[in-house]
Amino acid sequence: MNLNLMSISPRWQHYAIVLLAIATISLNSCAKIYYSPEAKSRAGSHKLIAIAPPKVSIAAQKKVDPEAIKEQQKTESTNFQQEMYSWLLRRKMQNRIFVEVQDVATTNAKLKQAGYFDETPMSPAEICEALGVDGIITSNYSLTKPMSEGGAVALGLLVGFWGSTNTTTVSLEIHDKQTQKLLWNYNHKVSGSIGSTPAQLVDNLMRNASKNMPYSN
């Protein structure tokens, strides 16, 4: 049976849209969280943090050029980094986090100067030093397919080649510059439909992760 949202009342339209949104991105299983005993005190001393470009991997597929996948991974990394920054900035404006977040353009320019994008190995503390920040958020996104049909088209794929769902395993970490220690780690597996976007995924992820993030007010 086809669902015609215009044929139902505004109230039920709202409920239907909410249900469709939940169906688009659903959380699977419970998140695994590490919270250092020093997390709140060290995070409380941070004035400025940055978001490192996420490390993104997309599952290899037959008949798909590995170089094309590599380029798409870079694109997804840029998208995720910007969406994470935008999400934290909104929370900062709402006084829901207390730390300042360095803008993405400044972060990436400084990392480029430090040789980060030339795959020069850098520890989280070294990244903090290069960026002039007190803490760094690092992340890993493991995707079974590109986040959008546009990504699939960019790889020259036929619709449906990768299937209709995308399982994403995400790991977020906060590292402290001064102690060079891991303060917080959040691991989760998320499933999204064919219409999932980086913005939807990050919003869903961060809303849950922020409940235990040491920067939250």
Image (cartoon, rainbow, N blue to C red):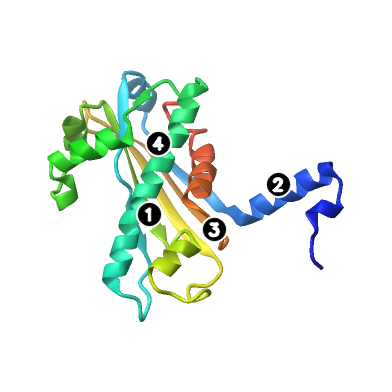
Q: What amino acid is found at the position of numbered circle 1 in the picture?
A: Glu
Q: Looking at the image, is mark 3 or mark 4 earlier in the sequence?
A: 4
Which labelled disc corresponds to residue 85?
4
The image shows residue 67, relative to residue 104, as above or below, that is below
24 lies left or right of 105: right
Residue pictured at 79% horizontal, 53% vertical: 5
Amino acid at the residue labelled 4 = Tyr
Instruction: Look at mark 3 in the image and give the residue it sits on.
Output: 191
Disc 3 versus disc 1: nearer the observer: 1
Q: Give the number of the mark in front: 3 or 2.
A: 2
Local packing at callout 4 (Cα closer than 10 Å; few below 14, some 14-19, many 20+) is: some
Q: Amino acid at mark 3?
A: Ser
Residue 190 rendering spot, x and y as whole percentages: 51, 54
Q: Residue visible at 14% across and 48% down?
A: 121
Q: In front: 35, or 78?
A: 78
Label 1, residues with CA under 10 Å away: few <14, some 14-19, many ≥20: many
Q: Would you name the residue on which mark 2 appears?
A: 18
Report which residue position mark 1 lands on. Answer: 76
Q: Is residue 103 left or right of residue 159?
A: left
> Mark 2 or 4 closer to N-term?
2
Left or right, residue 182 beside residue 84:
left
User: Can residue 145 be seen here?
Assistant: no
